[in-house]
Image: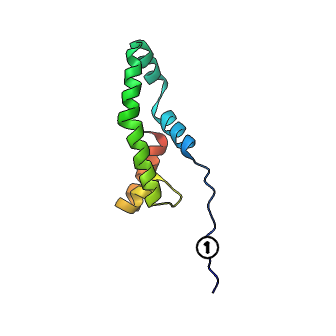
Amino acid sequence: MSEQTAPAKNKVFGLASMILFSVSAILVGDTIASSAAMGVQGLTFWIALGVLFFIPYGFITAELGAAWPDDGGIYVWVREAFGQKWGTVTAWLYWVNV
């Protein structure tokens, strides 16, 4: 018998893409302006934000992506946990950043 293997998917959305996507999705002009107004204290804010939010967010996303490698991201994760309705609502809200 010959072994059949599934075709490998091209990974277009890599680590750098995930980092830049997360940063750009969360940071907006008013956040940068307010941290610039804080001066050097803004650096402490950004370091704390990185340690307390971006690193755990990256770990959570990596873990969910490994557990459910299907295409669809957050939609698939929420759909598997809570059903079609909440998957759709979550994906839509995530897309429009409400």
> In this rendering, does residue 28 appear at all?
yes
Residue 73, horizontal then vertical, whole percent: 48, 53
- Residue highlighted by disc 1: 5
Residue type, label 1: Thr
Q: Measured along the vertical axis of the image, is residue 28 above or below residue 96?
A: above
Q: Residue 90 versus residue 38: which sits nearer the camera?
A: 38
- Whether residue 83 is visible, yes or no, is no
User: Residue visible at 61% across and 60% down?
Assistant: 9
Query: In the drawing, does residue 17 fall left or right of residue 28?
Result: right
Q: How many marks?
A: 1
Where is residue 40, by image quadrant? Answer: top left
Q: Quadrant of residue 98?
A: top left
The extreme bottom residue here reads 1
Q: Position of residue 72 (x, y in %)?
A: 51, 56
Q: Looking at the image, which residue is at 46% across and 60% down?
A: 68
Residue at 38%, 34% in the rendered image: 51
Q: Quadrant of the N terminus?
A: bottom right
Q: Nearer the viewer, residue 68 or 25?
A: 68
How was this image coloured? rainbow
Q: Residues within 10 Å of mark 1 (few under 14, many from 20)?
A: few
Instruction: Classify 23 as above or below 75.
Output: above
Q: x, y (%) of residue 20?
A: 54, 37
Q: Which residue appears at 49% of the width and 44% of the height?
A: 95
- 18 left or right of 60 in image: right
The secondary element bearing badge 1 is classed as loop
